């Protein structure tokens, strides 16, 4: 699957501390490996401190928002 981040999500990803960046990337990896779940509307993935909101269009995962609680 291909992952696309909207600009706002990409900006947040670039501004978070390294440990938060790693957690977000782990979440992205997890949703790309999940071939059974289809999210035509909004879906979320949550880690210990971070989250992301995404949708799936065919073989493209569009990450709409990312954030961290710290």
Image: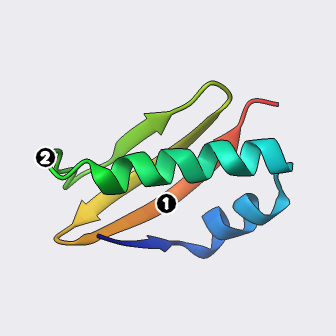
* Circle 1 Cα neighbour tier, 10 Å, few/some/many (<14 / 14–19 / ≥20): some
Residue 64 image label? 1
Q: Name the residue nearer the viewer: 22 or 53.
A: 22
Q: Residue at x 54, y 46 (%)?
A: 26
Q: Is residue 4 left or right of residue 23?
A: left
Q: Is residue 13 left or right of residue 63?
A: right
| Separation (CA) of disc 2 from disc 1 | 20 Å
Q: Which badge, 2 or 1, comes first in the chain's sequence?
A: 2
Q: Residue at x 45, y 53 (%)?
A: 29
* Circle 2 Cα neighbour tier, 10 Å, few/some/many (<14 / 14–19 / ≥20): few
Q: Residue at x 71, y 60 (%)?
A: 13
The residue carrying mark 2 is 36
- Where is residue 28 drawn, in percent x and y? 48, 53
- Where is residue 3 drawn, in percent x and y? 41, 70
Residue 40 image label? none
SS assignment at label 2: loop
């Amino acid at each position: 699957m291909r992952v696309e981040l909207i600009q706002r999500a990409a900006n947040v990803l670039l501004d978070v501390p390294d440990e938060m960046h790693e957690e977000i990337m782990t979440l992205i990896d997890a949703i790309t490996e999940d071939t059974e779940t289809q999210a035509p509307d909004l879906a979320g993935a949550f880690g210990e401190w971070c989250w992301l909101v995404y949708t799936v269009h065919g073989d493209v995962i569009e990450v709409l928002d990312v954030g961290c609680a710290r």
